[in-house]
Amino acid sequence: MYGEDPEELLTFLRTVPTSSLVSIQLPFIESGLSDLADGILFGPVIEKPSLTVEKFITGIPPDLVIKGQMANVPVIVGYTSGEGIEISRKLPAISAFLPVPGAVVPRELKLKWRPEILQEADTKIRKFYFDSKDITTEMLQEVTYLETDRMFAYNIRRYARYHYFHNTEPVYLYKFTPETERNYTKKQYKMESVKGVCHADDLPYLFNVTCLDIPLTDASRSIIRQLVTLWTNFATIGNPTIEGSVQWKPFTESERNCCDIGKNLICSQDIDSLNTKFWEEIYGEAQISRANNAET
């Protein structure tokens, strides 16, 4: 049994083949709070205060962000238009969780809410995404919309808000939307009938993936050139805007600028604003400010 002595554990892990670590099957953890995202079996580990090493994560990540405990550096954050495909593709296997009260409520909130508040939020979320209908295994698109917001997009936009409130350096927000032959993961999942760019399907546009047989056409080549230029500009001068193209303005609370990265660049305010406002109400964060969230 390893795990008590960090040095002993490190020595052991260095002897284990990489393939064994990647293929490991973690046991299901029964928490009484089961939901659609239980298939994701990894997460950040809060390091023990007793460890005599420099610590990277010392508290629950959302709490650290809310307190402003983040690096004051320029950042780009964003999401794909169909992030939730990563969850909805497992819908038949996780269908037993669908009727469970709280199954659609983010884990962060479930861990701290009283049952009656949890039920109220569950009811609101089911009405917003499913018109209060029973969730069935045929609702791939609806579940994708829910999980795109619940698991990914909202908290990314939420991070952008807190970065803006606590830091002086800019934060640039984007939404990735192109659907071409480069969207490899969605095809592998056989989820072509669902709208949106799957989680991880932006990577073949940014990196030269040679380990997979992914087609390349003139249409996707222009998107690749555009995306790489944006990221290169940001890395070199701190501003992703492409000369001669639309200006990608930083995200602020008054101007919630977001760049829709598709076949063309469309930089505007309040992309997905209806869904954002809904989740701000669920989280109780419709009104936040530097003053009332700064660490005391």
Image: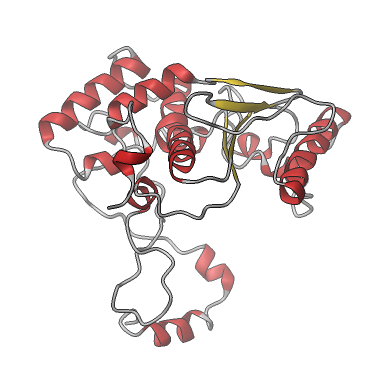
Q: Residue 135's quadrant in the figure?
A: top left
Going 44% across and 30% down the picture, which residue do you hit? 149
On screen, residue 269 versus residue 213, left or right, reads left
**Residue 240 visible in image:** yes
Q: Judge by depth and name the residue closer to the eye, 154 or 68.
A: 68
**Residue 214 visible in image:** no
On screen, residue 207 versus residue 104, left or right, reads right
Going 12% across and 37% down the picture, which residue do you hit? 114
On screen, residue 93 versus residue 254, left or right, reads left
Q: Judge by depth and name the residue closer to the eye, 4 or 250.
A: 250
Image position, residue 246 (x, y; %) = 75, 24
Going 34% across and 85% down the picture, which residue do you hit? 5
Image position, residue 59 (x, y; %) = 32, 59
Image position, residue 11 (x, y; %) = 48, 86
Q: Residue 282's quadrant in the figure?
A: top left
Q: Judge by depth and name the residue closer to the eye, 8 or 74.
A: 74
What is the residue that sits farthest to the top in this orientation?
Answer: 131
What is the residue that sits farthest to the right in this orientation?
Answer: 218
Q: Residue 91's quadrant in the figure?
A: top left
In the rendered view, how is the structure colored?
secondary structure
Image position, residue 101 (x, y; %) = 20, 31
- Which quarter of the rendering shows the N terminus? bottom left
State how many labels appear: 0
